[in-house]
Amino acid sequence: MVTMALKLRLELALRHSDTSVTEFLEQLVGEPLDAHERRHKMIRASTPNLLGVEDGHRLLQRSAVLRGAESGRPYMYAESLLVPSRLPVAVCRQLENSSHPIGRILAEEGIGFSRFPLPCVDRPGEGAFPVPDDYSPVPDDYLLARTYRIDIEGVPTMLISEWFLPALDSFLGPS
């Protein structure tokens, strides 16, 4: 069972971190993370939307489970909606062909970004994210869920929803 203390501890740690979520989690758990069970699907935007793109603009819908590269433990499930036309080609290529999480790809490419909190969604497919046909359902038990927009050079580029999974609780200290 998730305690309020664990949720608050994780929320505060994330809020005070000046790194990507990938880097934060890797430091917390002491192992590299890889994106597993990745699903990519090109969709068309509808309007209005939180990315400021026109109706019909191509978007990449992505879901992944971030797992420890050594332990295989699932630490986070994430759903993202990205505007590929606002990303360098090298980023799009890595998203498609590597198991690197988005945060690592942005860091490797030297891309700075700003994060803007959005109303949180509790379950996949709520809010800004249409449910993909083949999404991986989030476990019923998670420590924290949050949603935010990523802007690169002041331009809305991604919407991300994250569910931090119970495998993290042992790294957050005693309740």
Image: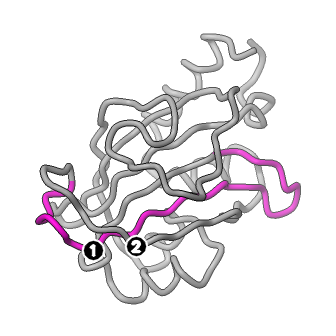
For residue 58, the mark is 1
Residue located beneath label 2 in the image: 42
- Residue 175 is situated, as x and y percent measured from the top left of the image, at 74, 12
Q: Quadrant of the N terminus?
A: top right
Per the rendered image, the range of residues in magenta is: 51-76
For residue 47, the mark is none
- Residue 70 counted in the magenta span: yes
Alpha carbon of mark 2 to alpha carbon of mark 1: how far?
7 Å
User: Quick one: label 2 or label 1, which is nearer the N terminus?
Assistant: 2
Local crowd size for mark 2, using a 10 Å CA cut-off: few (<14), some (14–19), many (≥20): few
Badge 1 amino acid: Arg
Front residue of 132 and 159: 132
- Name above or below for residue 9 compared with residue 146: above
**Secondary structure type for disc 1:** strand
Q: How many numbered marks does the figure carry?
A: 2
| Res. 83 image quadrant | bottom left
| Labels 2 & 1 near each other (Cβ < 8 A) | yes
Badge 2 amino acid: Met
- Residue 7 is situated, as x and y percent measured from the top left of the image, at 59, 20
- Residue 45 is situated, as x and y percent measured from the top left of the image, at 24, 62
- Residue 139 counted in the magenta span: no
Q: Is residue 168 left or right of residue 12?
A: right
Q: Residue at x 65, y 19 (%)?
A: 6
**Secondary structure type for disc 2:** strand
Residue lying at the far right of the rendered structure: 71
